[in-house]
Amino acid sequence: MQPIRNIVVLTGAGVSAESGIATFRGPGGLWEGHRVEDVCTPEALRADPRLVHRFYDLRRAALADVAPNAAHVALAELERSWTGELLIVTQNVDDLHERAGTHRLLHMHGALRSALCAVCGTRVAHTGPLPPGSRCGACGGAALRPDIVFFGEIPYAMDRIVDAIGTCDLFVSIGTSGAVYPAAGFVEWANDRGAATLELNLERSAGSGRFDESRLGPASELVPAWVAELLAGQ
Ligand code: NAD
């Protein structure tokens, strides 16, 4: 196996679960009591903007009551101490990675504390509620929406993600169900590149069979242990 220098880490809702943020597909397949189609699609935003904005207003407000857990903290420590390349790609829209101290981070599915202008595409930091019809400071259009990549929309920063996976020696997936594409396909890209692949998840996921190794358990235990192991061997 080639020596590990360049690492790409993909995180999903499972990394934030122990901070108290519900995962996507909890019991009943609902996210915080809503069907995904009712709050996570462009059609839903058009059909019922008040419901969709309110849903994300509540998720944004809930960030005030949560804190990074040991998994976020360990990944920030990895960034500080790893001498090779490292990129953390998160599917999460919470801000717990950055609050733990991670900087080399891409939010491929958007961010709760950001607003997107549906007219000019400007993205601005935003806290507090975002009522439908809020005005964009850049173009003046009454078109600010939650900066969330809905199903059917193209995730952010795909060119940078493709480049990073194309040059990585190790790809690690943490707390993700392997059900949402294109993220679920990253492990195949890493396998094609010849990188080692590791999954850390509470239970076996839809993609477990595609990883060289799967470790099962809570992220707050598995991630610090893996980071310690990696740094010890550096
Ligand atoms: P998912 O809910 O589909 O899957 C979560 C995975 O995490 C599951 O495989 C589960 O077994 C695992 N898991 C649960 N608790 C865990 C723990 N303590 N330790 C380790 N693993 C644990 O989430 P996903 O794969 O990220 O995909 C769904 C989409 O949901 C993403 O696009 C994301 O934008 C959105 N989402 C984000 C948040 C957030 O920002 N925190 C929360 C819910 C959903």
Image: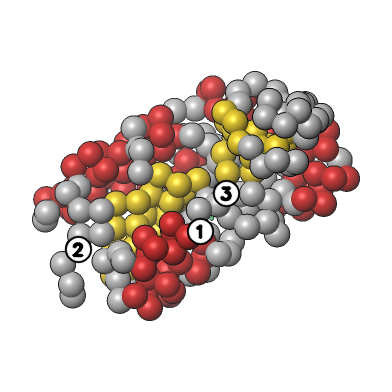
Mark 3, other Cα within 10 Å: few <14 / some 14–19 / many ≥20: many
Is disc 3 placed on a helix, strand or loop? Answer: loop
Q: Which numbered disc flags the more N-terminal residue, 2 or 3?
A: 2
Question: What residue is shown at x 67% (from left), y 29% (from top)?
Answer: 138
Question: Label 2 amino acid?
Answer: Ile
Rendered view: 105 above or below 9: above
Q: Position of residue 53 (x, y in %)?
A: 75, 34
**Residue 118, located in which quarter of the rendered image?**
top right
Residue named by callout 2: 4
Position of 212 with respect to 142 (left or right) is left
Seen in the image, is 189 located left or right of residue 39?
left
Label 2 lies in ligand 1 vicinity (Cβ under 8 Å):
no
Q: In terms of secondary structure, where does tag 2 sit?
A: loop
Residue denoted by label 1: 158
- Tell me which amino acid carries mark 1: Met
User: Disc 3 vs disc 1: which is toward the camera?
Assistant: 1
Residue at 31 percent of width and 43 percent of height: 75
Residue 224 image position (x, y, % from top left): 27, 44
Q: Is residue 162 left or right of residue 226?
A: right
Ligand 1 within 8 Å, label 3 CB: yes
Image point 35% across, 51% down: which residue? 87
- Disc 1 crowd rating (10 Å Cα; few below 14, some 14-19, many 20+) is some
Residue 55, percent across and down? Answer: 72, 35
Tag of residue 109? 3
Query: Looking at the image, can residue 199 be seen?
Result: no
Q: Is residue 185 above or below residue 37?
A: below
